[in-house]
Every structure is written in structure tokens, then in C-alpha cells.
Amino acid sequence: MASKTDLYPSPRSAGTGVSPQLAHQGMLPAWGLWAVAAGSLALALLVLTLAGRPTPVATAALTGLFFIAGSWAASRAVEGARRARDRLATSVVTAAFVIATIPLISLVWTVVSRGMDMMSWEFLTSDMSGIYGQMREGGAFHAIIGTIIVTGLTAAFSIPLGLFTAIYLVEYGRGRLARAITVLVDVMTGIPSIVAGLFAFVLFTSYAPQYRSAFMGAIALSVLMTPVVVRACEEMLRLVPNELREASYALGVPKWLTIVKVVLRTSVAGVTTGCMLAIARVIGETAPLLLTVGFITNINWDAFDGRMATLPVYAYRSFVQGGVGVERAWAAALTLVAIVMLLNLTARLISAYFAPKGAK
């Protein structure tokens, strides 16, 4: 007598999790994809050789196309249509990732290779006082200090304002005012940087036409940074489960203390990362600083009076100068990239330290 299992077979093989329709199909051997890759490379070289002199870029692109098609065909013949579609999707996603990283790798390689020609301890610790023409002496220490001062002031203005605005929109905002703030933030996100510089320029020069300072530049950059902080913090705060808020309210905790101890504590990692991304967004801006901060060849420690050098403006003016100035521009760009990487590393350490134990 046939058992119930024989009459009604399980949709999946016992202990394997594979449906009976796929159980009888084979699997590509471990060396199968390597063989497809080798064949794709050989075929790409043959086609490019017949068409003309092969180049590394063309060879890599054509090899990738042949590999995607070859892996799909091999999987279709051996594993079936379902696994073939899965391998095709995996190959396409992997190819898209590789293509997306090519500009980033090329940019980093170009900045590092060209910036190291001028990079030295003297470049990082000296300014441009008394340097004229094509002299190779001098460095960007005054621009590094100026960038730190301007960016620090910008963060001091933008991060608290952006964070409090995000808290209002998520926790308190209702009605027309919240919608108006949301629309305003969306509009400010798309403002060109030169418009922010012109805004700060007109705001200050209406009362003091010759006034230039790091404070003036920080106001211009805050117009660009604040909406980025608002959007990043708002998204992170919305990711906090409402159950955590309700549990805190059930224990009699006031709303403001729930926001401080529960909501912000839970989202601190994402909020910190968003703020660092916002800083990276403005630290390399050039047009607003050309109008508001200007440029000098020595160090100015006063953030509220006098022109001040910054790395983006230093790189721009050095590149326009030509000659050895181009080398200084690439070295300044490398220094700026290193500062951004250092800020991101600091943000990760801060978020890892303050994140809840379960999120570490």
C-alpha cells in the first residue's frame, strides 16, 4: 500500500531544500566559471586582434560581455533556466558594481600619483609667505588651518540646526508648518554653491563692503550643509521603531527625554555618518569661498576678521598659476582627500563607541 508520502510528495527534497524539479539537474563544477572566464578572455583577444590592436579597456569590457553570456549559456545547459537566470542577474549586478568603482579608483589613483610629487613634510608645515613665481618652496599649512577653521564653524552652525529641525519634523511636526519646512529643505538641497556664496556676500557686504572672513564663508557653506544634515538625520530618526518610543512612554518617561535617551541613542551611528557626509559635501567647495573668504599667503587665526586661505581655493589658484603651481594643486587635493578620509574614520569610531550594544 502506497504511503501518504508517496501519494503526496513534498515540494522540496528532504533535508536539501531543493524542489523535485531542480533535484535532477546538475551543478556547474567549481572550475566551470573559471573555464568560461578563460574562454571569454581568449575570444575577446581574438576578436580585438582581428579588428585592430587590442587595448586593456576594450579587452576587459569585451571579456566581461562574453563572460556574462557564456556563464548564462553554460548554466542554462547544465543547471536549467531558473539557475541560469540567477547567475545572469548575479553577473549583471557584479558588472554594474565594477563599472561604478572604476571612476572612483581612477580618481583616487590620479590624485595620489600626482599629489605625491609635491607632498612632503615641508609642504604640510609651511605657508606661501615670500614665495613668488615658479619657486618650489612653500606649502599649504595656512590653507589647512583655514579649511579646519571654516569647516569647524560651518559644522557648529549646521549640525545643531539640522538635527533640531529633523527632530521637529519626525517627532513634533504636523500640518502646514512641517510641510513648508520640508519643501524649503528640498529646495535648499538643490541650491548651486555659487548662489550660497552670493547670498553670504550680499548679506555682509551690504554693511561692510570690504569685509571678508572665515565666519562669512561658514555662513555660505551652512546654507549648503544644513539641508543635507536635515535629510540625513530625518531618515535615521524615522528608522527608529515606534515600539521603542511607546515602551518609553508606557514607563512614564517624558517625550523630550525619550528623544534624548532612546531615539537619538538608537540612531547615533546613522546620525553621525550623515553629519560626516554633510561635512564632506561642503569641505571641498570653492566658489562660495572665493567670494566670501578670499585668499592670503600666510596664516590668519582670526575667524571673524580678515581673509583666510582654504585648500579648495589654494588648489584653484595654484592650478591657474601653472607650472609648479599645478603640482601644488594636486598636493592640496591629496591633502583634502586625506582630511575627508580622516573625518570619516573618526565618524565610524564615534558611532561604534556610542551605538547601542546590540548594534555594535
Image (tube, rainbow, N blue to C red):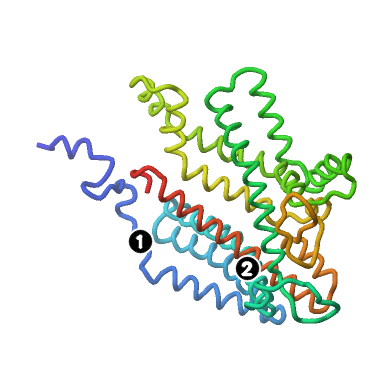
- Which quarter of the figure has residue 44? bottom right
* SS assignment at label 2: helix
Taking the spot 82% from the left edge, 78% from the top edge, the residue there is 323
Please indicate whether residue 313 sits to the left or right of residue 68 in the image. Answer: right
* SS assignment at label 1: loop
Q: Amino acid at mark 1?
A: Met
**Residue 48 visible in the snapshot:** no
Q: Is residue 25 above or below residue 335?
A: above
Which badge, 2 or 1, is on the more N-terminal residue? 1
* Residue that protrudes farthest toward the top in the picture: 175
Answer whether labels 2 and 1 touch (C-beta < 8 Å).
no
Taking the spot 69% from the left edge, 24% from the top edge, the residue there is 180
Where residue 194 sits: x, y (%)? 81, 48
Foreground pick, 319 / 182: 319
Where residue 80 sits: x, y (%)? 41, 55
Foreground pick, 57 / 173: 173
Mark 2 surroundings: few (<14), some (14-19) or many (≥20) residues within 10 A: few
Mark 1 surroundings: few (<14), some (14-19) or many (≥20) residues within 10 A: few
Quadrant the N terminus occupies: top left
Q: Is residue 266 above or below residue 315?
A: above
The residue tagged 2 is: 108
Tell me the distance, in whole angstroms, between the alpha carbons under discs 2 and 1: 40 Å
Where residue 251 sits: x, y (%)? 33, 21
Q: Is residue 139 above or below residue 161?
A: below
The residue tagged 1 is: 27
Foreground pick, 73 / 94: 94
**Residue 35 visible in the snapshot:** yes
Taking the spot 83% from the left edge, 42% from the top edge, the residue there is 204
Q: Amino acid at mark 2?
A: Val
Where residue 184 sits: x, y (%)? 71, 31
